[in-house]
């Protein structure tokens, strides 16, 4: 054992920052001309579904506190930040009239980022379908694809001179799985065929938004944010386990990764969909839309791996088909857990993603757009100076950065690392249960923000563009 320390340096201009989303932080969800989205509506009809009955109405109040918040970001060394535009704030009915108050708000927010020298990365859709669009079928309806492309074009025209990094979607697989398979998002449907249609239309919507961006010839880049959960088989030597892991990868990762980056679906996925009678409605010309509108860059949200094994029994054909027909979940005996949340922590996953992108996706420029650790009841860890001592979060980030650094040093084209998230925020059905922020948000006390130990630690990493490691 020695006490020696050394530094891992990251590439010049590396992005350091965090991500959040409009619905999760803005608050003012029924004010300033905003239309309702599916979250406002779902909370209205089923408030009991939301942790502690807290809905999207007042989430963290970024709408009125953005100036101080952006200053706080600067104080802890951020040079970049991702958030989203709320479609239903900008265009209350999803299509048609623009809400001028929203234009003013987003202009002010973006100006503030730029004044503080923080590069904004702006996402167009983070789980928050305008209710008016959901009422006519949401992503199942091809009309919504057109509506989204129009909305995207509006955003590029209104804000493109300020925003140089756009992302079409955040985790597009999530509304598919949560909304059409597992009932965590409205409309709580369980139907794999409809889920496939939703996924397909979303991929086309993303490509169409990119097509609009290209046609405007602006001087930025357009990408997508995907949550990649590497699939690991129980046994690398067992063909049935390998098959199960491959199917999980096709369904949950490659269903968006391949069309977005390679401009086409994997043949194996197409066969799987055909064999199971899940083919979506496809329009003429879709193939070319995908092929001609690949993303310029990729954001990757990484939290945990997916460990699977061959299914233990044949799927009961009386039950609706689910992805779990093709694999069983598997608990790795050596797994390390986030005991506060019940998720496996597998830092090497970030390296495996880095190498997968390098080797199989043309080494496209990418960044870690979310990584982080949710913990309940963090008040337990408040010290005498009123700071939450979240050493577990520091450890989590550090270990992931070590693996990321290894991926970069082996040639993976990663240009940044963003944490989820800057301040504790509202997390859909989980409300404020799990806290992820560098800043604590006291929801009992006017959303007062206070720095955590991890925020102070991150400042050093970001400002020095390097990670200090103790030699073991
Ligand atoms: C993924 C999503 O982008 C975000 O909305 C969510 O709150 C975090 N991960 C944490 O679960």
Image (tube, grey):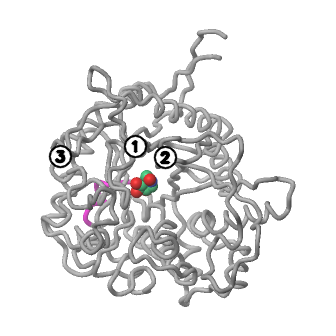
Name the residue tied to disc 3: 65
Residue 82 shown left or right of residue 239 in the figure: left
Task: Tell me which image quadrant ligand 1 sits in.
Answer: bottom left
Name the residue tied to disc 2: 341
Q: Are discs 1 and 2 less than 8 Å apart at CB?
A: yes
Residue 327 shown left or right of residue 229 in the figure: right
Residue 466 location in percent, x, y?
A: 50, 26
- Let me know if residue 160 is in the magenta part: yes
Q: Nearer the viewer, mark 1 or mark 3?
A: 1
Residue 179 location in percent, x, y?
A: 45, 73
**Magenta segment:** 158-164
Which SS does the magenta portion mostly show?
loop
Mark-to-mark CA distance, 1 and 2: 7 Å
Sequence-wise, the earlier of marks 1 and 3 is 3
User: Does residue 320 appear in this view?
Assistant: yes
- Name the residue nearer the viewer: 137 or 443: 443
Q: Within 8 Å: ligand 1 and the Cβ of disc 2?
A: no
Residue 458 location in percent, x, y?
A: 41, 30
Picture mark count: 3
Residue at 26% across, 58% down: 54
Residue 376 is marked as 1
User: Does residue 220 appear in this view?
Assistant: no
User: 95 above or below 261?
Assistant: below
Residue 394 shown left or right of residue 252 in the figure: left
What element does badge 1 sit on?
strand
- Name the residue nearer the viewer: 200 or 109: 200
């Amino acid at each position: 054992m020695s006490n020696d320390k050394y530094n891992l340096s990251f590439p010049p201009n590396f992005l350091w920052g965090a991500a959040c989303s409009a619905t999760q932080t803005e608050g003012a969800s029924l004010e300033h001309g905003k239309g309702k989205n599916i979250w406002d509506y779902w909370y209205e009809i089923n408030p009991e579904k939301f942790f502690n009955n807290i809905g999207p109405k007042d989430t963290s109040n970024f709408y009125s506190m953005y100036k101080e918040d952006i200053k706080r970001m600067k104080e802890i060394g951020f040079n970049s930040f991702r958030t989203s535009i709320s479609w239903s704030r900008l265009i209350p009915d999803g299509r048609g009239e623009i809400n001028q108050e929203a234009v003013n708000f987003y202009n002010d927010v973006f100006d503030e980022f730029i004044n503080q020298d923080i590069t904004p990365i702006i996402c167009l859709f983070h789980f928050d379908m305008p209710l008016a669009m959901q009422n006519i079928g949401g992503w199942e309806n091809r009309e919504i694809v057109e509506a989204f492309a129009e909305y995207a074009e509006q955003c590029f025209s209104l804000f493109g001179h300020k925003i140089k990094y756009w992302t079409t979607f955040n985790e597009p697989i999530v509304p598919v799985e949560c909304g059409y398979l597992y009932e965590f998002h409205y409309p709580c449907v369980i139907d794999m065929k409809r889920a496939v249609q939703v996924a397909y239309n979303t991929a086309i919507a993303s490509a169409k938004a990119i097509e609009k961006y290209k046609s405007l010839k602006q001087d930025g880049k357009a990408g997508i944010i995907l949550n990649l959960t590497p699939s690991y088989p129980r046994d690398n030597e067992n063909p049935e386990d390998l098959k199960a892991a491959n199917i999980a990868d096709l369904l949950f990762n490659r269903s968006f990764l391949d069309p977005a980056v390679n401009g086409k679906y994997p043949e194996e996925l197409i066969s799987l969909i055909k064999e199971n009678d899940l083919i979506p409605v496809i329009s003429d010309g879709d193939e070319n839309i995908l092929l001609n509108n690949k993303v310029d860059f990729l954001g990757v949200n990484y939290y945990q791996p997916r460990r699977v094994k061959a299914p233990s029994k044949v799927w009961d054909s009386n039950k609706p088909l689910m992805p779990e027909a093709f694999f069983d979940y598997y608990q790795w005996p050596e797994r390390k857990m986030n005991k506060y949340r019940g998720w496996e922590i597998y830092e090497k996953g970030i390296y495996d993603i880095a190498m997968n992108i390098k080797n199989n996706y043309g080494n496209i420029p990418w960044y870690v757009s979310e990584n982080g650790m949710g913990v309940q009841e963090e008040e337990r860890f408040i010290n005498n100076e009123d700071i939450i001592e979240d050493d577990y979060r520091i450890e989590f980030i550090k270990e992931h950065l070590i693996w990321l650094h290894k991926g970069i040093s082996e040639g993976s084209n990663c240009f940044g690392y963003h944490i989820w998230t800057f301040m504790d925020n509202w997390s859909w059905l989980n409300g404020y249960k799990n806290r992820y922020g560098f800043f604590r948000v006291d929801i009992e006390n006017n959303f007062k923000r206070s720095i955590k130990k991890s925020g102070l630690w991150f400042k050093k990493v970001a400002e020095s563009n390097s990670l200090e490691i103790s030699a073991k």
